[in-house]
Image: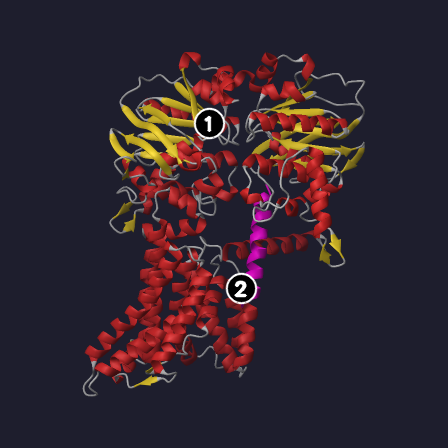
Amino acid sequence: MNKKSIRAVVKIKRTASILFIKGGVLPWFLGLAVIGFGLTNENFLTERNLFGISRQSTYLVLVAMAQMVVMLTAGLDLSVGVMLAMTSVVSSMTMVSLWSGYGTGWESVFIGCLAGLGASVGIGTINGIGVAIFRVPPFVMTLAMSSIVFGLSLTITGGTPIYGVPESFANVFGYGQIGGIAVPVWITVLCIAVMYIFINWTPMGRYLYAIGGNIRAAGLSGINTRFYLLGAYIISSVITGIAALLLTARLESGESNIGANYPLLSIAACAIGGVSLFGGVGRLSNVVLGAVFIILVQNGMNLLRINSYLQMVAIGMLLIVAIIADNFRQQLILTMSEQP
Amino acid sequence: MKIRHQEGLVSKPNKARTRPLLRLENISKYFPDTLALDRVNFDVCSGEVHALFGENGAGKSTLIQIIAGVIRPTSGTVFLNDEEVIIGSVQHARELGISAVFQEFSLIPQLTVEENLFLGSEQLVGPFLDKASLHRRACETLNSLGFALIPERKVMHLSRAEQQMVEIAKAFRTKPSIMILDEPTASLTAHEANRLYAMIEVLKDEGIGVIYITHRTNEIYRISDRITILRDGRQVATVSVADTSEEKLVELTVGRRIEQIFPEINTQSGRLLLDIKWLNLSNQVARDVSINVHAGEVVGIAGLVGSGKSEIGRACFGLHKIRTGRIAYLDDPVYDSARRINDLSPRAMLDRGMLYLPSDRRVEGLVMIQNVRENVSLPSLGLPKFSSGLLLNRRSERDIVGEVARRLGLNPIGIERSLEHLSGGNQQKVLVAKSLVRDVKLFILDEPTVGVDVGTRASIYRLIRDVCEAGAGVLLISSDLSEIVNLTHRAYVMHRGELCTELARDNLTEQALLNYFF
């Protein structure tokens, strides 16, 4: 090999590693997935399928953002799944009991949504109190809460779905479209915008990073760490509640079992998006892309007729690979910064 | 034996002494933006105590970290028994017979003394722990050192001095040929320190070479045979203790820089800022302490680690529990146990214009994964100049922090760099910068120059002068004697939780302070 080609190879290697360092694993994962599924399946890149992916992504994008808020503070929320379930059950039961069966039933939808959000915020507040005031480790607190809430929602429903929510609810928030884009997608975009401003442009957003980075230094800087930790869990539960309402509209029923996958998937989306499990690090845009990526992979595997059991295997493996790649990236950053 | 020294005095090799166990030649160590060690030569012989002396940031800890295998030198050679070695890790150093006792304890608090002693080299019977033999050997080790420790006690229940003993016993257990002691008496009482000196005599008799780091000249004269003096990463001299007077030693250590490092502070003391009366802290760490600070004044609190000086500062910021006493800030009672007033919290005191900068910047002071800008503005984000209503004003944040960074000479680095990539000195500047973007009337600085280079020290001292001349008060908590002597208008001395004296400017000398330390 002559010198020129060696130099070219070195240059490409260096550019690739800089890209990897700056962007993390996500761009590579996304690119590989799009190319891979696009080549193996002609239906993957069709307009119809992409529309479907965008709508399917909304729920996980929202829950992943909720998860991110908590993870920034070096926490973890394993109860997002049951929060979805409880919100769904409470909102649909309220709607069913209030709706006369005639007319559009918007009043009952409105009150039902408020009741559902109330349920999720209630769960979030208890999580927050446990973690921030009583210093229960987030892992234990939210794991215990997921058992408690799941048990309660099964008790309330007897394990059966709750049917009979007003059709208008499902028609607008589940299946509606504005300008060729699904209503849930619009709502999610709005939530992303609000979250973006919250995380990057408000003092509280900054405080969450600081608390996750070094809670003692944050406290010495005059930040009321308990208050903001509690706030993080409450904000997280509001977003999860919104996701739950959209999901209920989509399913036209309230169910206790809808959220089982979400703790894993939302943590995976955050981790693939570069949110540190130790807190203080993470970007909203990457978390959104991480969630979209997971849905993309699921969709691609569906098109390839890979059965759902094997899909679980694939998602778990992706999560581990993402973490290993990120560790590798951290080492690379260290070695690059040591070079003069 | 050919050793090149760069400057200063060089002792003639003592004929009576055996050949060196360990010899370092031309050791240099570069960190990203500092040269921590510059071609240093060092050796230690069997049965001698070789002291390392120098100011904070002189390179002592870098040197022993290289010897102990924690870090590797950028260049230079290490010889062990005249054979060239590359010490790859702490484990490797231990196998070579080099044991280190660092200031940061390497003990697991939840385990017992004996479990800690044998951690990593447990006695086994088949696949199981041989607890009986472990216990017996732990007792043997402790007895041979004359340490009265109960092997079954958990380390977390021991005092700092006792933990220090466990640490020493752990290093001693492997029967090393070289032992490194990094300021072992920093947290010991005089009685305990005497026991340690006796123990070092035992080590010497067994032919162990001891490398001893200390800040105290009296210790050097008591136990060591030779001294190597480091300053700014360079080896100033290696001298034998017997031939060197104390004045000479101080002169070599401090050099001529002393006038340049410490600025002249010309201020009149103004109104009373902080008035502490009969303060008693929980756990008896401070008893009946009364201290006051006026505007335009630098007041020192000197004392050893564990003397309670740090806790006084922390208590004023709501970080340490108070049992009884009164604290008034600007004539406003912020704490009064009799009247049940307690307004102390970081937020409340920040809003009143008091700021406490902790001594451990990594643990308490800074968010290491965030960048300079985010760290500097963190305590002040609620101020109108940083946020308008709900949203942050990021442009003004960038401008204000950029301006402060320029003042501190941080600008070549840029305010968007993560703190993890900054040198210790620059990290300390960022910590100080936190106080400069808001209106502070009273600065409580807890060891503001620990582990930073001379240049940063000088700029921090100039900053103290600037804020002081601008009318603020400074409470300087420090175990660095030269800092107290040269910078403060008057100083209190703490010893084992009690205020032993207050020294006015005219009586403030290192010797006077030391007399009260022990």
Q: Is residue B406 visible?
A: no
Quadrant of the rendered image containing residue B58: top right
- The residue at which mark 1 appears reads as B478
| Image location of residue A145, percent across then percent down | 41, 67
Is residue B35 rendered magenta in the image?
A: no
| Image location of residue B37, percent across then percent down | 63, 30
Nearer the observer, B164 or A193: B164
Q: Where's the C terminus of chain A, which quadrant?
A: top right
Q: Which residues are magenta?
A: A319-340
Residue under the image location 45 percent in, 21 percent down: B484
- The residue at which mark 2 appears reads as A28
Callout 1: chain:
B
Q: Amino acid at mark 2?
A: Trp
| Image location of residue B359, percent across then percent down | 46, 35
Is B260 drawn above or below residue B44 in the view shown? above
Q: Where's the N terminus of chain A, which quadrant?
A: bottom right
Same-chain check, marks 1 and 2: no
Residue under the image location 57 percent in, 16 percent down: B250
